[in-house]
Amino acid sequence: MPGALTSTQIRNLVENEPPLIASFINLEAQLQPSGIDLTLKEIARFTSSGKITCDNSLRRTSEFEVIDFDNNRQLHLTAGVYLVTYNEIVNLPLNLMGLALPRSSLLRSGVTINTAVWDPGYTGRAQSMLSVLNPNGFILEQNARIVQLVFLSLGEETESYRGTYQGENLH
């Protein structure tokens, strides 16, 4: 039956091959009643513009540079927009899609994360956009839990994602 997966269903799929989620930091801490928290691997700042065209023949994503964590494994971010890469590798079967939402602690601090739909068949270590709206900035620690990924059952298998970002950031 279509709907969001429970923690029990997610845990069972983590034991599959390939696992629904791999490279997690602490499954017990990350597993939530209706999703799993994804953790911060790295943050980058955008250094160029991007471009999207009608048929993607001239698509160009923005260039970026990774920001180094300080000696305490923290980043002191000023107001602005950043590119987030997660630690976890997601392997979506053909009957599941994913939606990631910011943890409420981020929202309560004037920070949000924007993500796109994670299509059935997607495999990779995804990226999202983190927006620090708080004029006082925000501090983030490496490996902090920042979004909750919710898995939605489609009720039946569909075609696999075949886009440019299939298999991204697996290094």
Image: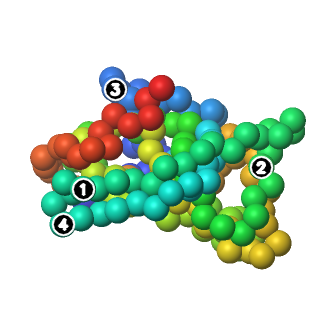
Q: Is residue 133 visible?
A: yes
Residue lying at the far right of the rendered structure: 71
Which residue carries the number 2 mark?
75
| 5 sits to left or right of 68 | left
Q: Is residue 85 above or below residue 34?
A: above
For residue 46, which numbered disc appears in the image? none
Residue at left offset 23%, top offset 46%: 163
Q: Earlier in the sequence, mark 2 or mark 3?
A: 3
Residue at left offset 50%, top offset 65%: 114
| Quadrant in the rendering for residue 86 | top right
Which residue carries the number 3 mark?
18
Going by the numbered disc 3, the residue's amino acid type is Pro
**Front position among marks 1 and 3:** 1
For residue 58, which numbered disc appears in the image? 1
Residue at left offset 45%, top offset 55%: 62
Q: Secondary structure at mark 3?
A: loop
Q: Is residue 37 visible?
A: no
Which residue carries the number 4 mark?
54
**Front position among marks 2 and 3:** 2
| Quadrant in the rendering for residue 19 | top left
**Front position among marks 4 and 2:** 4
Q: Nearer the viewer, residue 8 or 93?
A: 93
Going by the numbered disc 4, the residue's amino acid type is Cys
Q: Are marks 4 and 1 in contact (CB under 8 Å)?
A: no
> How far, Cα to Cα, is label 1 from label 3?
34 Å
> How far, Cα to Cα, is label 2 from label 3?
33 Å
Q: Secondary structure at mark 1?
A: loop
Neighbours of disc 2 within 10 Å: few (<14), some (14-19), many (20+) = some
Q: Is residue 82 above or below residue 107?
A: above
Going by the numbered disc 2, the residue's amino acid type is Leu
Neighbours of disc 4 within 10 Å: few (<14), some (14-19), many (20+) = few
**Front position among marks 4 and 1:** 1
